[in-house]
Amino acid sequence: MLCSPVLGFYGSDYLDATNVVRKELRVGEQYTNVMLGYFIIGYHTVLIIVRVFTMGFPLLYEQLWACNLAMPLAAVGIVTGRPIMVGAACLAVAIDQILWYVDVFSRICFGRWSVGVAKYMDWPETTLVTKLTSFHHLWFLPLCLWHLRSTKCGMPIESFILSSFGVCVMSGVTRLVVPFKIKKSTLSHRKKSDGDGLQYSNVNMTHEFWKDIPVALLHKMDGAKWYFYIPYLMVVYNILHWPFYILMKLLTEA
């Protein structure tokens, strides 16, 4: 968790060596953005404490999800005036959190999850605590985009570079330390249970694409050796993120 803001901090400064992108804010803007950054940090801290207290320390596995690592990355970027970090956090979660809107709209209007990224909210194993602490998928991205627009920072191209590098490192670490399935006694009830006595983990989809997503093409490399699957995942990630980068750049331009 600490690696995300630390690597983001130094990576941002390396990519912005001439200090062109870094934003010096006025006094009023400084106060607003410091409070915004502290709010994200405070929310993330409460999320960790509540989930661990109610469901046990194995819930710390979930902190390797991109949506969780993006929060401290964005918070430090906001507080220190480094929009590259904020933009990278937005890009790291863009696909998932934008598709959350599609899923939630579909669930409310038609009673089904059209995409499947948020379908775990209906799993019988999903606890009330998990549900109540999952709605950052809906407010985190708009909040960060608002910050980038209101401070006239926009979406720096360096954010795409930092995001691509960070997601690559994150995926490799996740594949290394988090197994595909975990015994029920060592993992939160949030995970979908399988018949072999294990529970679905697959953090950051580093073993296969999320099983609730019904797109056969994306599952072509499911279960492949890591040296085949991780590069495949990174290629898909970077191809899909270009249109999201362009969209968010347009949304954040003042």
Image (tube, grey):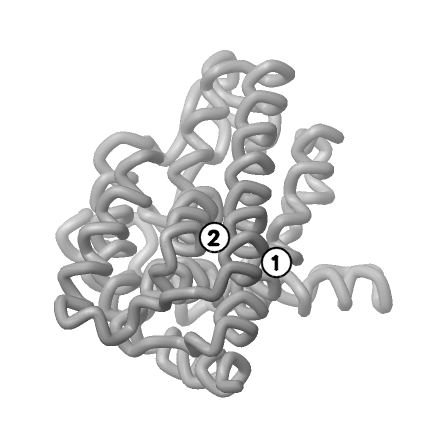
184 vs 62, nearest the viewer: 62
Amino acid at circle 1: Gly
Q: Residue furthest front?
A: 27
Check contact, mark 2 vs mark 1: CB within 8 A. Answer: yes
Left or right of 171: which side holds 62?
Answer: right
Q: Is residue 9 rendered to the left or right of residue 250?
A: left
Residue 60 place in picture, x, y as percent: 44, 25
Residue 34 in picture, x, y percent from top left: 51, 49
Q: Which mark is residue 210?
A: 2
For marks 2 and 1 on the same chain, the one whose residue lies earlier in the sequence: 1
Q: Residue at x 65, y 57 (%)?
A: 139
Q: Quadrant of the N terminus?
A: top left
Q: Which is more toward the observer, 154 or 98?
A: 154
Residue 57 left/right relative to 110 = left
Q: Residue at x 64, y 16 (%)?
A: 54
Residue sitting nearer the eye, 243 or 175: 243
Mark identifier at residue 186: none
Q: Is residue 55 above or below residue 223?
A: above
- Does residue 86 appear in the picture of this structure? yes
> Where is 40 relative to 89, above or below?
above
Q: Vertically, is 241 above or below 221?
A: below
Q: Position of residue 12 (x, y in %)?
A: 23, 60
Vertical arrangement, residue 191 with respect to residue 8, above or below: above
Binning the other alpha carbons within 10 Å of mark 2 as few (below 14), some (14 to 19) or many (20 upward) gives: many
* Cα separation between marks 2 and 1: 8 Å
Q: Amino acid at mark 2?
A: Trp
Q: Which mark is residue 116?
A: 1
Q: Position of residue 29 (x, y in %)?
A: 53, 62
Q: Which residue corresponds to the image point at 60% horizontal and 61% vertical from the top-left?
A: 143
